[in-house]
Amino acid sequence: MEDGSPKSAYELAMARLRQKDADAGIENVPLTDAQKAAIAEVRNFYESKLAEREVLHQSSARRATDPEALKVLEEHYQLDRERFVSDRDAKIARIRRGEG
């Protein structure tokens, strides 16, 4: 938008981020259609895994009567969620780098 019109706060922030990336030597490479499809597939897979894990957790939580057992179930559930999210993000990063 070099036409002299006022820029929104969003446009100004994006311009600063692009400049910061350029200064750091980060190159903005658009994703290929194959990469976009692979990323969508990974996201769908992990979304279904997270939903499945949530259903299993809710089922187990309803059966738990001991508060301590419920606490342990919740901890395991949170660890599983974090692992799924971490695995998903790592796979997406590899796809973005062109590693598969």
Image: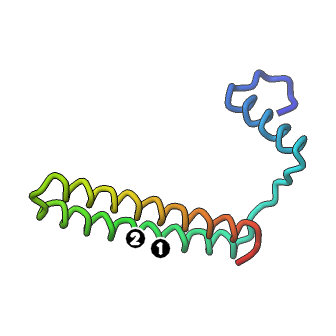
Q: Nearer the viewer, residue 33 or 93?
A: 93
Q: Nearer the viewer, residue 35 or 23?
A: 23
Compared to residue 71, the image places residue 60 above or below, namely below
Residue at left offset 73%, top offset 31%: 13
At label 2, the amino acid type is Ser
Alpha carbons under labels 2 and 1: distance apart: 5 Å
Image marks 2 and 1: residues in contact by CB distance under 8 Å = yes
Quadrant position of residue 92: bottom right
* Relative image position of residue 83 (x, y in whole percent): 48, 64
Compared to residue 89, the image places residue 4 above or below, namely above
* Relative image position of residue 17 (x, y in whole percent): 77, 38
Q: Which residue is mark 1?
A: 45
User: Furthest residue to the front?
Assistant: 68
* Relative image position of residue 42 (x, y in whole percent): 55, 72
Q: Which residue is mark 2?
A: 48
User: For the C terminus, which image quadrant?
Assistant: bottom right
Query: In the picture provided, is 74 more to the left or to the right than 7?
Result: left
Quadrant position of residue 88: bottom right
At label 1, the amino acid type is Phe
* Relative image position of residue 66 (x, y in whole percent): 12, 56
Residue at left offset 82%, top offset 33%: 1
Q: Secondary structure at mark 2?
A: helix
